């Protein structure tokens, strides 16, 4: 029993409008100078190191009265 493909009513069909908007990129890449990016990278690395030290301390020094 073959069935025919469903017909879409004309008022619900998509309108194809070739416009300039369709060819524009969805995002723009702005180059950032390396000397402006380096301090942010350093802060991120420092925060990861501090977080690692904190987790190491919490694992090696458990608190017996803590919930959990």
Image: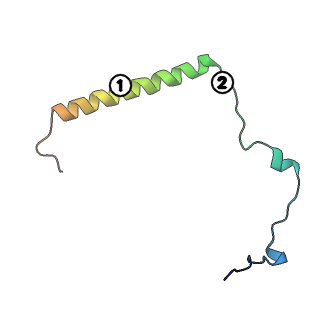
Question: Where does residue 3 sit, x and y in percent of width and height?
Answer: 70, 80
Residue 40 tag number:
none
Q: Nearer the viewer, residue 16 or 56?
A: 16
Question: Where does residue 23 sit, x and y in percent of width and height?
Answer: 82, 45
Q: Is residue 9 left or right of residue 54?
A: right
Q: Where, by quadrant of the figure, is residue 12 drawn? A: bottom right
Compared with 11, 38 (above or below) is above
Residue, disc 1: 49
Compared with 66, 61 (above or below) is above
Indicate the secondary structure of the residue bearing disc 1. helix
Q: Quadrant of the N terminus?
A: bottom right
Residue, disc 2: 32
Q: Is residue 15 left or right of residue 40?
A: right
Residue at 33%, 31% (x, y): give it: 51
Q: Earlier in the sequence, mark 2 or mark 1?
A: 2
Question: Where does residue 60 sit, x and y in percent of width and height?
Answer: 16, 31
Alpha carbons under labels 2 and 1: distance apart: 25 Å
Q: Is residue 68 left or right of residue 27?
A: left
Q: Where, by quadrant of the figure, is residue 18 drawn? A: bottom right
Residue at 39%, 28% (x, y): give it: 47
Residue at 24%, 30% (x, y): give it: 56
Compared with 52, 14 (above or below) is below
Q: Where, by quadrant of the figure, is residue 26 drawn? A: top right
Question: Where does residue 52 sit, x and y in percent of width and height?
Answer: 31, 29
């Amino acid at each position: 029993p073959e069935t025919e493909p469903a017909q879409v009513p004309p008022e619900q069909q998509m309108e194809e409008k070739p416009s300039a908007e369709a060819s524009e990129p969805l995002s723009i890449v702005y180059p950032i100078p390396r000397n402006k990016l380096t301090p942010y990278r350093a802060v991120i690395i420092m925060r990861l190191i501090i977080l690692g030290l904190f987790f190491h301390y919490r694992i090696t020094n458990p608190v017996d009265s803590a919930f959990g």
